[in-house]
Amino acid sequence: MADPKLAGVGAFGDLGTHKLDILMWLFGGIDEVTAEVRAVTHRYGDTDETGEGLIHFKNGILGTLAAGWVDIEDPVQLLISGTEGHAVIVENHLYYKSKKVPRTDSKEPYTQLPAAPRAPMHQFLDAVGGSKDQPLVTPREAAARVQVMEAMYTGARERKWVKVG
């Protein structure tokens, strides 16, 4: 991943694609994006080591995406806030408050969650072994994420908003 000629991206694409996948799973399709990517320590020459993207979702939501190799912990994995409530994942703990869900105060980790699915690698191996209906990213979903990430890199390079699709 440290050589964009081979990998196509640097740190922002490497780690940001996973966060982008979650954002698109939560909020749907994306209309346009822009980003700023940069090398910080130059350990990998001019390969980007960090980035920040701005996202206009088709449903009107405005989002941001930060990812890079230079954040030593990445303690805040997700932050969603809006008029009805907010949720934040800090160090793998969900803090949540909603006007529509009783006993959510965002002061203590929210633990009333469904059982976790099997680890993604196990789901993948199950699918390879013939198990149907594994909750894996489809080829179309993967292609959509690549298209958005490519648009973010274009936005960073050209310093402009880029329509997706």
Image (spheres, rainbow, N blue to C red):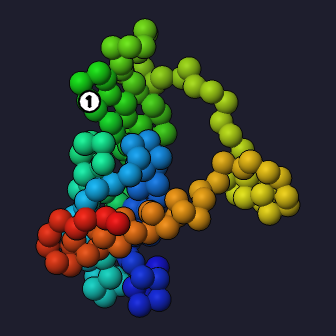
Can residue 9 be seen here? The reply is yes
Q: Secondary structure at mark 1?
A: loop
Name the residue furthest top. 102
Q: Is residue 161 above or below residue 120?
A: below
Give 24 or 118, whichever is nearer the viewer. 24
Q: Which residue lies at the image location 26% right of the left edge and 29% below the top edge?
A: 82
Residue with the mark numbered 1: 82
Name the residue furthest front. 165
Give 74 or 52, whichever is nearer the viewer. 52
Quadrant of the rendering where the C terminus is positioned: bottom left
- Amino acid carrying label 1: it is Gly
Give 145 or 85, whichever is nearer the viewer. 145
Alpha-carbon neighbours of circle 1 within 10 Å: few (<14), some, or many (≥20)? few
Locate residue 144: give its quadrant: bottom left
Name the residue furthest left. 159
Q: Position of residue 153 (x, y in %)?
A: 29, 73
Q: Is residue 3 above or below residue 106?
A: below
Q: Which residue lies at the image location 44% right of the left edge and 63% below the top edge?
A: 145
Locate residue 13: give its quadrant: bottom left
Locate residue 101: give its quadrant: top left
Left/right placement of residue 114 relative to residue 110 reads right
Q: Position of residue 126 (x, y in %)?
A: 80, 55
Give 71 or 141, whichever is nearer the viewer. 141
Left/right placement of residue 115 relative to residue 8 reads right
Q: Which residue lies at the image location 49% right of the left edge and 39% below the top edge?
A: 92
Question: How many numbered discs sit on the rendered protein?
Answer: 1
Can residue 35 be seen here? The reply is no
Q: Which residue lies at the image location 72% right of the left edge and 49% below the top edge?
A: 134
